[in-house]
Image (cartoon, grey):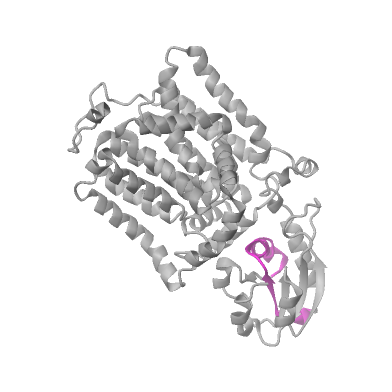
Amino acid sequence: MLLETEIPPAVAPSRPSATTRLARPPLLAIVAVVIARTALLLSVAGRYGWHRDELYYLAAGRHPAAGYVDFPPVTPMLSAVARGLFGPSLVGQRAMTIAAGAVVTVLAALLARELGGRSWAQGVTALVVGFGPMLLGSNILFQTVSFDQVAWAATFLVVVRMLRTRDPRWWPVLGAVAGIGFETKYTVVLLLAGVALGFVATRAGRELLRGRGPWIAMGIAVVLAAPNLCWQLTHGWASVEFFRSQNADTRADNPPLIFLRDFVLLGNPLAFPLVVSGLVFLGRRPRWRPAAIASVFPVVGFLVLGGKGYYAAPAVLMLLPAGMVCVERVLTARRWAQVLVPVALLASIVPLLPVGIPVQTEHTLVTHETYKVRDDYAEELGWPELVDTVERVYRELPDAQRSRTAIFTSNYGEAGAVDLYGPSRGLPHAASAHLTYRYWGTPRPHATTLLVIGARRPWLDRHCTAWHDGGVIRNHDGVHNDEWGEHVDVCQLARSFGAEWSSIRNDAP
């Protein structure tokens, strides 16, 4: 209770005194970390190939919309930007997530600074976060996760800045960050709920709730989220239905022990005591208790709801800087320990590198079966060979029939591969009933022949007047991923593809 006196009244901020002025950031150290991690990731970003999700985001970027079935619009928008800058380049796409990781690294260091950390805490935070498993493993793939981490780190930074300065002028910034975060990945909702609970449940937070600031923040967030909400309304709340249908499978695949294992691994097992120290550091200081609640609530929430470990992993971006500040105060007079801690934390990451990022050659990956440890790598192999098979079946058709032939796939990865590699080979774009692809219609509505990828015999019997097996999908690595052994079937339709589309899109292969 004695620490309650740390909290000044919620009045207009005054110029900070010399005793409360923040420590100068160790710019050279932070810049060095950003450059080193960026160089490392760019050096391996082109290995293996496109992940199925990356193919999906690339296709979504060619279909701009205010919403998509399984993600908000920011990631497809950034994919379109990368495509405009670099063309359909795998490294160009991944450069966006690598840049996002650099931003998160800087924000984490700034969080340590806001919490009272000096040069050591800020620099080591940048090092451990920037080279941590969470950022390295996510930044090497173009997915929503990396951009979601930016939203979480920015939210934490704004909240801590508000708590430190008691300045209500940060409310509009928090609203903007919340709105953009919602348009990036829906999982940010649990973080925002934690922020709200932190402000309501603590004295430090309630003092900042006075006035119009919270309402302005809420209004800004709603305005930014409105386009996506309108899309959901006009598409039957497609995302709500999708996540509801996926929840049982997610819970089954991620029981509590698996969730906690992944959460700890992503935060770096050796650094986990620092994460716990950060929570204690925040919880014991009334000024920072709202931040402690905001960081813990989503972890507990995803654990109870049955989410995946990486959903809650960005909470580490609040707790680890706090832990570093705590450790810095303990190690002030121990120079040897100040060197040993970052060296040990960095060394602990080295054994995880082959799993986190593609440092192995494709041959070594396959030989050592590393793709069985991280199945993302298996989903980066074989897409050109899949399109090779489709092209061969397509070329075997008579010339007159090819002009009336469309391609239909069982999932977005197959469709995305055809859309990426197919046009240069004279193939039409693909249609699919999987997730948002089902809203993009049929590129060849007049077609009466379908090349169907990944369908089962009952589906073919229902929709085809006649069909035959055109080929089997393999990859040169011999990796049995999700596409290995699937068939490309030639299906004759009773009517045009456009006329059959309604029944086909509601009956996934």
Q: How many marks?
A: 0
Q: Position of residue 77 (x, y in %)?
A: 49, 57
Q: Nearer the viewer, residue 73 or 84?
A: 73
Q: Is residue 384 magenta?
A: no
On the image, the x and y values in percent for residue 433 come to 61, 71
At 57% from the left and 66% from the top, the residue drawn is 435
Q: Position of residue 456 (x, y in %)?
A: 74, 72
Q: Position of residue 337 (x, y in %)?
A: 51, 16
- The answer to whether residue 88 is seen in the rendering is no
Left or right for 5, reference 384: left
Instruction: Identify the residue at horizontal 23%, vertical 32% (top origin).
Output: 7
- What stretch of residues is rendered in magenta? 399-427
| Residue at (31% x, 46% y) in the render | 173
Vertical arrangement, residue 195 with respect to residue 468, above or below = above
- Residue occupying image coordinates x 42% and y 55%: 182
Query: Quick check: can you spot residue 312?
Result: yes
Q: With respect to residue 59, does 179 lie above or below?
A: above
Displayed quadrant of residue 400: bottom right
Is residue 23 rendered to the left or right of residue 78? left
Q: Is residue 58 above or below residue 282?
A: below
Name the quadrant of the C terminus: bottom right
